[in-house]
Amino acid sequence: MTEEKNMQDDLFFPPVRTTSATSGSEYLSEATSMKNLGGRFLALWSTDHPGRFVCAAFSDAEGLRILRAPVAETSRTFPSITHLFPLASRPERTVRDFTGWTPEGLADTRPWLDHGFWKNAPAGERDYPFVRVEGEGVHEIPVGPVHAGIIEPGHFRFQVVGEKVLRMEERLGYTHKGIRALLRNRPVEDVARLSGRVSGDSAVAYQWALAQAMERATRTFPPERALYLRAVLLERERIANHLGDLGALGNDAGFGFGLVQFGRLKEDLLRNNDRVFAHRYLMDMVVPGGLRENPGKEDISILLEDVRRLQRDVQLLKIIYDEHGGLQDRFSGTGVLDPMLAGDWGLGGVVGRASGQMLDLRHDHPAWPYNRERIPVALSRRGDVGARVQVRFQEIRHSLAFLHTVLTLLPEGPVRTPLRECGSLAEGTGRIEGFRGEVLVWVCLEKGNIVADAYFHDPSWHLWPALERVVPGNLVADFPLINKSFNPSYSGHDL
Amino acid sequence: MYRIILKILKTGLLTEPLSVTSPESPAPFLPVAKSLSIRHVDAGSCNACELELHALSGSYYAPERQGIRFVSSPRHADLLLVTGPVTCHMEQALKDTHDAMAFPKAVLAVGDCACNGGVFRGSPAVRNGVDAIFPGTAKIPGCPPSPNILLSALRGLSRPVSGDLPASS
Ligand code: SF4
């Protein structure tokens, strides 16, 4: 009986295994074997449900693996795994900020998201001790949190010699909105709405990941048409963001033509989003149990027409970008992310794939309908800004072809089933390849479908540390270009 | 090169005629005529409001034809445009930016978050909107407000408050 259920689960939901370690040392040895077997670190968070735990999420060939370490009332510590997975450092510091639990063995004792301004919270340090580089001719450039332009807030500290960056350090957390505190003990609808606003540019990815987590927790299987349409929404979100990024990258390299042309294509797409789905950024379309509305035949033909127009226009713009010497000169060799580092850290998303990492959830652990209509992985090995531009172009092309198939084969029927009630405490995870990379959502539901706790993981947790590694050696003036080619989210990271 | 020129010629003029100012826009309150320099500060938005500000700057809306432009330095700005619910961590930076602006200056809240905290209202890490810092701020609601709404509201602001300002010929 359970076997059967699991089979149905596997068909709908990408596989996940949860292990609860009985002690800190068991957690550490499990994490070590995870590392030895080639597992990638995804996320780490703390929770009080269903007990006091630190949860670490990894990804391996079989799927998602969640490892839990118990945190004892008396010692209030958990073993740090940063020596195994460097990306765990900031999440562990964040856990300390919010709970006061100490990651044992973590060298970095500075707070991370806590700037020391909240009421009733462990105080962080107001003067953040940045690492300093000493030496003749070294000077420091502080940037932010308010940047010159329409961008999210964050602080960067550059140590430079002449034009060259020796070191760059980030200070984030300015957009911290207390989302996790806000969502506890709220009904699923409220949390679904909130999830679309963790990082507004990835509304579909987040809302789908949350819906998947809740559907898994309550054993609800949404109708096939809803899943197909979710994929349509997700790919439209990806295309819109990639178009925006390509335009901005052209502009940052001094090619204003790109901004105008790509900006126009993006705006056309957004307007049709509004026309068909009543929201330019597709917020609140994906709901737990399915989709808010069922688009009609006419709507589908608008979406198909978009695909045809974009296929033609993007192809021409790609030729123009490729042939433009000045542009390629700025793109190539700038902001190189070493494929070795990308491999060691297990970086996915556009950034990882542009550094030779063949990782894409839509391909590796496809959720329905990606297991039906396959999508190839876009790949480049060069690791520079140009590679990230190429990967974006490739992904747009793949997504358009995918959209064409899915829209043509769209099954008929309803798009929503009510979410089933969970009897007691139930957990679920959702994992979706957003336009930046993997979005992971963990949710714990209480009786009556009240959200006891949830965690949202943004791929930017990986992108920000990678950016810090990439910038040194480049010119200060190239930083905006490199940053744009990564396009990490501040809001998604700061939560 | 010829491809670029051909594409430019084929694309033609993208800018759309101005729509009428919507009645929901805030009443004019800025003593500037035919020119409005805006400094934007993201006080913890989800970033969709920024996407709309970017879209607004695009060719379809072309706010510059109305003299509306986004500037990098607060010293050049007439208007402080704030998005996001004002997180505790951005409060100081927001005040500093406002302090750096020259008189006459005004503040405008864009998006539900900046108006009243939006979906983040009630969180201990936010101040529930710009009003908490600058009471009586003018507001443009929406989650996020579309570029059309933004454009018509911003146009409304840049009209002289009364007839006593010289209209440029
Ligand atoms: S108003 Fe809406 S779109 Fe704007 S920042 Fe707030 S949640 Fe995001």
Image: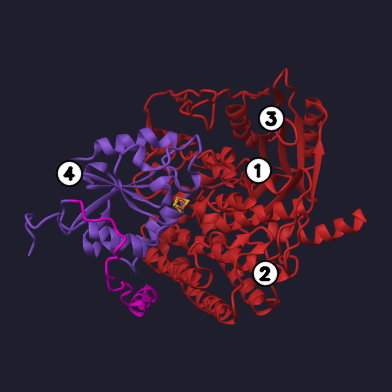
Hey, which quadrant is residue B59 in on the image? Answer: bottom left
Residue, disc 3? A83
The yes-or-no answer for disc 4 within 8 Å of ligand 1 is no
Lateral position of residue A357 relative to residue B141, left or right: right
Question: Judging from the image, what secondary structure is the residue with disc 2 in?
Answer: loop
Q: Which of A66 and A361 is in front in this view?
A: A66
Q: Is residue B26 magenta?
A: yes
Which chain does tag 4 point to?
B
How many numbered circles are shown?
Answer: 4
Task: Look at label 3 and name its amino acid.
Answer: His
Which chain does tag 3 point to?
A
Q: Which of marks 1 and 3 is nearer the N terminus?
A: 3
Q: Which of marks 2 and 1 is nearer the N terminus?
A: 2
Question: Judging from the image, what secondary structure is the residue with disc 3 in?
Answer: loop
Q: Residue A371 carries which label?
A: none
Determine the CA span between mark 2 and mark 3: 46 Å
Residue, disc 4? B104
Hey, which quadrant is residue A324 in on the image? Answer: bottom left
The yes-or-no answer for disc 2 within 8 Å of ligand 1 is no
- Mark 2 packing: few (<14 Cα in 10 Å), some, or many (20+)? many
Determine the CA span between mark 4 and mark 1: 46 Å
Determine the CA span between mark 2 and mark 1: 25 Å
Placement of the C terminus of chain A among the 4 image quadrants = top right
Task: Look at label 2 and name its amino acid.
Answer: Val
Which chain has been coloured red in this picture? Answer: A
Residue, disc 1? A454
Residue A382 location, x and y as percent? 58, 54
Task: Look at label 4 and name its amino acid.
Answer: Pro
Residue, disc 2? A415
- Mark 4 packing: few (<14 Cα in 10 Å), some, or many (20+)? few
Stretch of the chain drawn in magenta? B1-30
Which chain has been coloured purple in this picture? Answer: B
